[in-house]
Image (cartoon, rainbow, N blue to C red):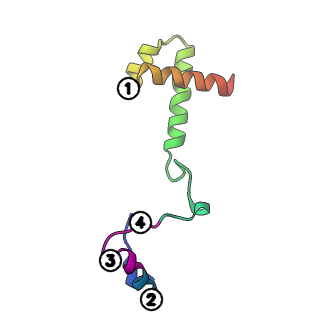
Amino acid sequence: MSYIKATKLLPKDLIEIIQDYIDGEYIYIPKKENNRKSWGENTTTKKDLAVRNINIYEKYKNGYSVKELADEFYLSQKSIQRIILNIKKKYC
């Protein structure tokens, strides 16, 4: 995230009002609700995890144990079980 100097963006009167509340400190102004993006929308992470999870499920169906999958994917056995259960619920 980059910073924008308020004096280059906001009118002087508004800056003075803001200074009454917070003077010389950093302030974060969140995006409007309708401008927010959901998790993973800017990257391929969401898609990558979905592909990984399908891969885990396919290997499980082909005889890999939960422990083997946990070791291979560096996840806990509980996480592997959760992934398998979620895919079963979603696709089966």
Q: Which residue is mark 1?
A: 74
Q: Nearer the viewer, mark 4 or mark 1?
A: 4
Q: Residue furthest bottom?
A: 12
Q: Which residue is mark 4?
A: 28
Vertical placement of residue 80 versus 43, above or below: above
Q: Earlier in the sequence, mark 3 or mark 2?
A: 2
Q: CA distance from mark 2 to mark 4?
A: 19 Å
Vertical placement of residue 71 versus 46, above or below: above
Q: Which residue is mark 2?
A: 13
Q: CA distance from mark 4 to mark 1?
A: 36 Å
The foreground one among 59 and 37 is 37
Q: Residue furthest right?
A: 92
Q: Which residues are magenta?
A: 18-29
Report helix, strand or loop for mark 4.
Answer: loop
Q: Nearer the viewer, mark 2 or mark 1?
A: 2
Report helix, strand or loop for mark 3.
Answer: loop
Vertical placement of residue 26 versus 6, above or below: above
Q: Residue furthest left?
A: 24
**Amino acid, disc 1:** Tyr
Report helix, strand or loop for mark 2.
Answer: helix
Q: Earlier in the sequence, mark 2 or mark 1?
A: 2
